[in-house]
Image: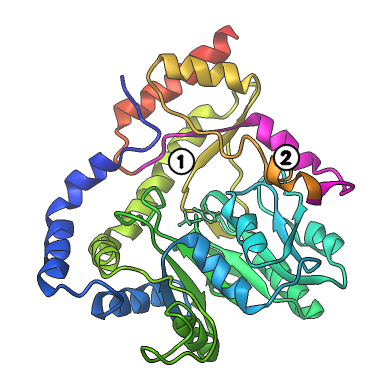
Amino acid sequence: MNVPLLDLTAQYRTIKDDVLTAMISVAESQRFILGEEVQTFERAIAALSGSKKGIGVASGTDALLLPLKLLELRPDDEVIVPSFTFFASAGAVVNAGGTPVFVDIDPGTFNVTAEAVEAAITPRTRAIIVVHLFGQMARIEKLAPLAERHGIPLIEDAAQAIGARRRIDGEWRMAGETGWVGTLSFFPTKNLGGYGDGGMILTQDEGLADRLARYRRHGGAKDYHHDEVGTNSRLDALQAAVLLAKLPSLASWSAARRERAGRYSASLAGIPGLTPPVVDEGNEHIFHQYTIRAVRRDTLRAFLADREIGTGLYYQVPLHRQPCFAGIVEGRPPLVATDQAAGEVLSLPVYPELTDAQQDWVIESIRTFYAHH
Ligand SMILES: *Cc1c(COP(=O)(O)O)cnc(C)c1O
């Protein structure tokens, strides 16, 4: 039985009419840059994410890059960032002129801890990037006060965590609402994916939101008038229209991912050599990825591939091991939990359209593997 890691065509079949109607309406209007769809979408996502403002930009990478640009980093300015994340989290730091300082993760949740971040703070630290990895929030109630105590802006990279939340002192906190800014990606494979690139910056600071909204259109509020040198990084009206058509499904998609994840964790518990993902107490996980730790991971992966089961290696080569960062990690402390995770993680198919039969095939195949290997 074929079980792809993700099946976007299965999703498309369920929403095709709404999405095509939305796309046609943009085509009929011939208004493609910013405009009403983008504004409506920005307001909807800000509300969903507990934020005052959302600024639609060209990608999740630019959502990180634009706020970092405002910090006017110099080469010896440091930005703390996990090594166990997608490349963009650190690439944006370099493109903004600064130097990433990689920190280790908690082996259970794969998220950074306040302790690791605190140990990496120096007088040169200009920002902290926290990634809510795989769809569950890091312990923001510890990280935010730490950043505040040191007067360092906190950036929440919530590209994988749209709509994820965490109960703190009896109240829900949304991914992206607590930091100086939060950032989202609408890359097609994210939980809310467009039909191309897209991203958003979230903030509670209206002055900052206005500045970022100018910055994404060459630093001017009006055409041909420039207050500062910005860039061109806007969410397309077509993407906003597609995303608005998909948005009403997001809550049920996240619930379906949680249900699939619960089914995996119940069925895979107790297999020696396999550790299901840990959900930190207080978190509502959206399972962008369902990532197990597995001994003999690469053999298991090949075994599953033979049975037409797709899996992912997020992240096989952590950022501190990337050739492009070799110079900046020289002499830094080792990242033991990150290296260990890189050798053990395996992401399984967890999308809402995954059928019971497909999931049973994945579970049965994993059981068979560990019964014989
Ligand atoms: C996807 C992703 C990004 C970048 O988003 P793009 O829209 O692909 O530019 C940044 N950070 C993390 C953690 C991501 O998963």
Q: Vertical placement of 220 versus 292: above or below?
A: below
Q: Vertical placement of 258 versus 42: above or below?
A: above
**For the residues marked 2 and 1, what is the alpha-carbon distance in whole angstroms?**
30 Å
Q: SS of the residue at dot 1?
A: helix
Q: Vertical placement of 261 versus 252: above or below?
A: above
Dot 2, crowdedness within 10 Å: few (<14), some or many (≥20)? few
Q: Nearer the viewer, residue 162 or 197?
A: 197
Q: SS of the residue at dot 2?
A: helix
What residue is at 43 percent from the left and 77 percent from the top? Answer: 54
**What residue sits right under mark 1 in the picture?**
261
Q: Nearer the viewer, residue 185 or 277?
A: 185
Q: How many marks?
A: 2
Left or right: where 101 falls relative to 38: right
Instruction: Provide the residue span drawn in magenta.
Output: 328-351
Q: In the picture, which quadrant includes the C terminus?
A: top right
User: What colour scheme has been applied to the protein in the rendered image?
Assistant: rainbow
**What residue sits right under mark 2 in the picture?**
321
